[in-house]
């Protein structure tokens, strides 16, 4: 049997596994990813990429590539309801681009998962060892990590690793082998996704939407691309004898034509996928050197498009912590903050997806009028409060005594704040080559930002030398055109006085903030020591 030593083994080659491998590689960690399927997904599955995930793609240099593969925001960030796509009662409402767009240098986007995975796989393969058609056949913990056996075209290989990240889906074999239970209600429904090709160009703009909920019969229609690919999602009831085998080509064709409302519509069926609509959260996200991420740790309904994105945020949170411990810059306690930070966010995200699904059920059952349904659905399309406003409270955050924002609608409304634990806010800066976002200053290391002349640059250099922790320090002027970066509002938006400073973790969340205090290397050393759980 061949043998291989890596620092981290990632199991699962979907979006979450690929993003985990990408982010670990950006931190210089030797990584092996294995995926039992021979290739990336051939079904669209998830389509919505939240603003926060698009920010990560921007940092990785693939934002434009994803946007080329996806659908125009202005045309398809919309939802519709009606009896069918051509029914007289069909109504549509679009997302509030003008309201939400200023909160980030990018914004929510629609790109089918089968196209997205190709982009992510290409990037991952350029950075690390990625092996599709390779299965995990066994694992056992050792004194200093995990031994795993993988099987692929070249036979079996014994892999020794310090840590294993299980991103192997909602029916995670790794989770099951660890005996980690899941919590959640019974399944909400047994679903069938029918992918088809048809020319729906006859539909006027006011009937084009990313997602339409229809009543006769109850189903949903999703736009997969902006041209010819679409999906109809419908359901069956096993308790009444229903099964996926009922969905013959004839049944699928009728479901598609009924949804569009055109009995003789030319349709080419491309595929059919059964799935279960459910919500669940794992009782633990870690067992020793093994970590759960994505659907292995939490499953959301597709309503809102949160599941894949929540998993990608898992990867972003976990990767820098693994890297810090592997490079001797963080203590083992830092790894405990992964579950402490991500599980509450996952639980809230799952609950919000359930709330979205219940609105759909009420509409399908006739308990909401079309006007009520479209208003509620449109309101829930805007979710920046959830995807940008979440914050962490753990040992990896140094509180500054300030309270969190309390918007009236924390699901929809994002209130920018640099309070420790929150995502560092986006503010446009003027650079020598044009506009630069504060988010563009961040990378796979700690970043200290302070007003120009505050005196924190020297303190940052001394703290980095004392701790061995890579630390980038940036000064931002309030209007001096000779300075590399300027903004008249940045310091105020970050809650800083003339001698203030903010320390941002490698995952873009604020770890420490000083409103206005004398620069001190020892204060920064203490902050880094706390955040990293250093002895």
Image (spheres, rainbow, N blue to C red):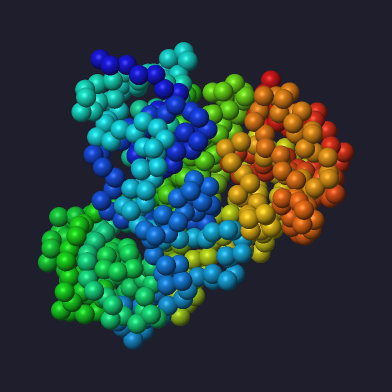
Number of callouts: 0
Q: Is residue 522 placed above or below 506 in the rendered structure?
A: above
Q: Position of residue 360 (x, y in %)?
A: 40, 67
Q: Nearer the viewer, residue 525 or 178?
A: 525
| Residue 34 visible somewhere in the drawing | yes
Q: Is residue 145 placed above or below 303 in the rendered structure?
A: above
- Which residue is drawn at the image coordinates 44% and 26% (left, top)? 30
Q: Can you name the residue that lies furthest to the right here?
A: 518
Q: Position of residue 38 (x, y in %)?
A: 23, 39
Q: Can you tell which quarter of the image residue 429 is in?
A: bottom right
Q: Nearer the viewer, residue 530 or 131?
A: 131
Q: Nearer the viewer, residue 486 or 366?
A: 486
- Which residue is drawn at the image coordinates 53% and 65% (left, top)? 382
Side (left or right) of 81 relative to 150: right
- Which residue is drawn at the image coordinates 48% and 38% (left, top)? 23
Quadrant location, the N terminus: top left
| Residue 352 visible somewhere in the drawing | no
Q: Position of residue 198 (x, y in %)?
A: 22, 71
Q: Can you tell which quarter of the image residue 39 is in?
A: top left
Q: Is residue 89 placed above or below 217 in the rendered structure?
A: below
Q: Can you name the residue that lies furthest to the top here?
A: 143
- Which residue is drawn at the image coordinates 59% and 21% (left, top)? 328
Q: Can you tell which quarter of the image residue 399 is in?
A: top right
Side (left or right) of 77 relative to 518: left
Q: Nearer the viewer, residue 109 or 400?
A: 109
Quadrant location, the C terminus: top right
Side (left or right) of 341 relative to 36: right
């Amino acid at each position: 049997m061949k043998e291989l030593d890596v620092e981290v083994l990632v199991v699962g080659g979907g979006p979450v596994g690929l993003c985990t491998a990408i982010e670990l590689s950006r931190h210089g960690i030797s990584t092996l990813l294995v995926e039992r399927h021979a290739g990336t997904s051939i079904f669209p599955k998830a389509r919505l990429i939240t603003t926060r995930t698009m920010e990560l793609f921007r940092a990785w240099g693939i934002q434009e590539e994803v946007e080329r593969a996806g659908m125009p925001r202005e045309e398809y960030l919309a939802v519709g309801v009606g009896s069918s796509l051509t029914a007289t009662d069909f109504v549509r409402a679009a997302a509030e681009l003008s309201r939400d767009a200023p909160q980030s240098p990018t914004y929510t986007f629609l790109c089918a998962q089968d196209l997205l995975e190709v982009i992510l796989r290409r990037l991952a393969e350029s950075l690390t060892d990625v092996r599709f058609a390779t299965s995990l056949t066994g694992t056992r913990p050792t004194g200093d990590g995990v031994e795993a056996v993988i099987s692929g075209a070249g036979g079996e290989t014994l892999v020794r690793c310090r840590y294993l990240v299980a991103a192997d889906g909602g029916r995670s074999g790794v989770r099951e082998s660890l005996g980690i239970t899941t919590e959640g209600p019974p399944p909400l429904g047994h679903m069938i996704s029918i992918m088809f090709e048809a020319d729906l160009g006859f539909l006027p703009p006011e009937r084009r939407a990313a997602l339409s909920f229809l009543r006769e019969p109850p189903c949903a229609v999703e736009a997969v691309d902006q041209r010819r690919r679409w999906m109809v999602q419908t359901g069956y009831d096993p308790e009444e004898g229903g099964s996926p085998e009922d969905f013959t080509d004839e049944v699928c064709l009728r479901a598609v034509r009924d949804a569009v409302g055109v009995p003789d519509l030319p349709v080419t069926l491309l595929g059919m996928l059964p799935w279960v609509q459910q919500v669940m959260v794992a009782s633990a996200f870690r067992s020793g050197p093994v970590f759960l991420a994505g659907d292995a740790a939490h499953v959301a309904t597709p309503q809102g498009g949160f599941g894949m994105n929540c998993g990608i945020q898992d990867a972003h949170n976990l990767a820098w912590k693994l890297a810090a411990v592997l490079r001797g810059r963080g203590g083992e306690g830092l790894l405990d903050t992964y579950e402490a930070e991500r599980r509450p966010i996952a639980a809230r995200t799952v609950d919000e997806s359930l709330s979205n699904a219940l609105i759909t059920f009420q509409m399908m059952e006739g308990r909401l009028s079309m006007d009520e349904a479209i208003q509620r659905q449109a309101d829930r399309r805007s979710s920046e409060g959830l995807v940008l406003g979440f914050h962490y409270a753990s040992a990896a955050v140094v509180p500054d005594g300030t309270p969190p924002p309390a918007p009236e609608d924390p699901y929809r409304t994002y209130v920018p704040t640099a309070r420790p634990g929150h995502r560092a806010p986006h503010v446009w800066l003027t650079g020598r080559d044009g506009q630069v976002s504060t988010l563009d200053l961040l990378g796979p290391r700690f970043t200290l930002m302070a007003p120009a002349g505050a005196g924190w640059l020297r303190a940052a250099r001394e703290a980095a030398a004392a701790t061995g922790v890579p630390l980038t320090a940036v000064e931002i002027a309030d209007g001096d055109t000779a300075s590399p970066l300027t903004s008249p509002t940045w310091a105020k938006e970050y809650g800083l006085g003339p001698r203030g400073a903010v320390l941002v973790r490698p995952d873009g969340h604020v770890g420490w903030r000083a409103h206005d205090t004398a620069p001190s290397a020892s204060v920064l050393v203490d902050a880094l020591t706390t955040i990293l759980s250093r002895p």
